Image (cartoon, helix red, strand yellow):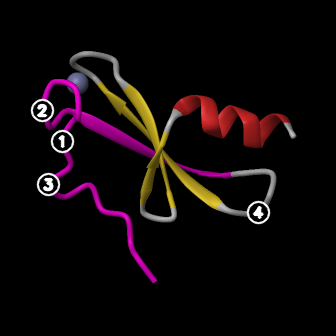
Amino acid sequence: MRKATAEGLVCAECRSESVIQIEMKLPDGTEAIFNSCHVCEARWWNRGGESVAVDGIIDLVSE
Ligand SMILES: [Zn+2]
């Protein structure tokens, strides 16, 4: 079981460490982590230890 950690987390866009993480539970019962960069406002998700495009999560939520 992999554990999400904010340690060493950097923004893929600007390499800033000012990234916040919010754990969310999706309608299908899986957990995803919403990541948001304070510096460049990049947003992305992690699900099962993998990065997911924002569009991919929206598809899941709208199902
Ligand atoms: Zn950034």
Dot 1 or dot 4: first in sequence order is: 1
Up-down relation of residue 7 to residue 57 (above or below): below
Q: Residue at x 19, y 33 (%)?
A: 18
- The residue sitting at the right extreme is 63
Dot 4 or dot 3: first in sequence order is: 3
Dot 4 or dot 2: first in sequence order is: 2
Q: Residue at x 22, y 34 (%)?
A: 11
Q: Callout 4: helix, strand or loop?
A: loop
Spatial CA span between label 1 and label 4: 27 Å
What amino acid is labelled 4 in the image? Answer: Gly
- Dot 1 corresponds to which residue? 10
- Dot 3 corresponds to which residue? 8
Spot occupied by residue 61 in the image (x, y as percentages of width and height)? 77, 39
The answer to the question of whether label 3 and label 1 lie on touching residues, with beta carbons closer than 8 A, is yes
The answer to the question of whether label 4 and label 3 lie on touching residues, with beta carbons closer than 8 A, is no
- Report the magenta residues as a range: 1-25
Q: Viewed as shown, does residue 57 lie left or right of 27?
A: left
Spatial CA span between label 3 and label 1: 6 Å
Q: Callout 1: helix, strand or loop?
A: loop
What amino acid is labelled 2 in the image? Answer: Arg
- Dot 4 corresponds to which residue? 29
Spot occupied by residue 14 in the image (x, y as percentages of width and height)? 15, 24
Ligand 1 positioned in quadrant: top left
Q: Callout 2: helix, strand or loop?
A: loop
Residue 15, numbered circle = 2
The answer to the question of whether label 1 and label 4 lie on touching residues, with beta carbons closer than 8 A, is no
Q: Viewed as shown, does residue 1 lie left or right of 62?
A: left
Is residue 23 one of those drawn in magenta? yes
Q: Is ligand 1 within 8 Å of the beta carbon of the residue shown at mark 2?
A: yes
